[in-house]
Image: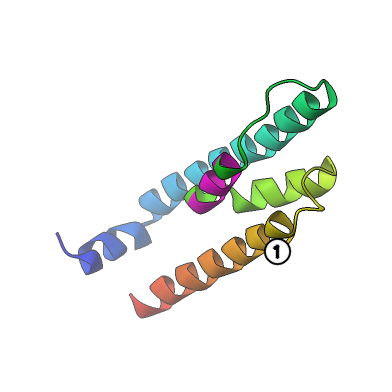
């Protein structure tokens, strides 16, 4: 199976629906992960590793992390979160737009 075959399948409306559901779920998960980590920080309990937040962002949850950062005022002073998460979001949007236009 070639990449162009996969792209043409993704353009089918049924697959777009599943992609939308996936992105919704991963962003909700990422948003609530920020909430859980903020609560753990307040209670001085074991924290969620920062690498895990970047893994969520790479998997599609960067918007949820970004909203969680500013809604819960969590990790907003770390430069790699403040600039890294929006950068990942922008890069993924550019890549998605390129794939959509190209194929």
Give x and y (percent) for residue 48: 63, 31
Q: Which stretch did the figure color magenta?
A: 52-58
User: How busy is the neighbourhood of tag 1: few (under 14 within 10 Å), some, or many (20 plus)?
Assistant: few
Let me know if residue 15 is in the magenta part: no
Residue toward you, 17 or 73: 73
Task: Give me the residue at 74% from left, 20% from top.
Answer: 45
Q: From this viewpoint, is residue 74 visible?
A: yes
Give x and y (percent) for residue 31: 68, 39
In the rendered view of the protein, which quadrant contains the N terminus? bottom left
Q: Name the residue under label 1.
A: 83
Q: Looking at the picture, does residue 95 appear above or below residue 54?
A: below
Residue toward you, 47 or 36: 47
How is the model colour-coded? Answer: rainbow
Task: Give me the residue at 48% from left, 48% from top.
Answer: 59
61 on left or right of 67 = left
Residue toward you, 51 or 21: 51
Q: In which quarter of the image is residue 102?
A: bottom left
Q: Looking at the picture, does residue 81 appear above or below residue 35?
A: below
Task: Give me the residue at 80% from left, 22% from top.
Answer: 44
């Amino acid at each position: 199976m070639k990449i162009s075959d996969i792209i043409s399948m993704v353009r089918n409306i049924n697959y777009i629906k599943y992609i939308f559901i996936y992105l919704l779920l991963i962003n909700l998960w990422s948003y609530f992960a920020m909430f859980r980590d903020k609560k753990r920080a307040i209670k001085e309990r074991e924290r969620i590793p920062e690498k895990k937040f970047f893994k969520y962002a790479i998997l599609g949850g960067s918007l949820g992390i970004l909203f969680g950062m500013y809604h819960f005022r969590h990790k907003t002073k770390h430069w790699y979160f403040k600039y890294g998460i929006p950068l990942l979001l922008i890069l993924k949007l550019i890549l998605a737009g390129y794939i959509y236009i190209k194929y």
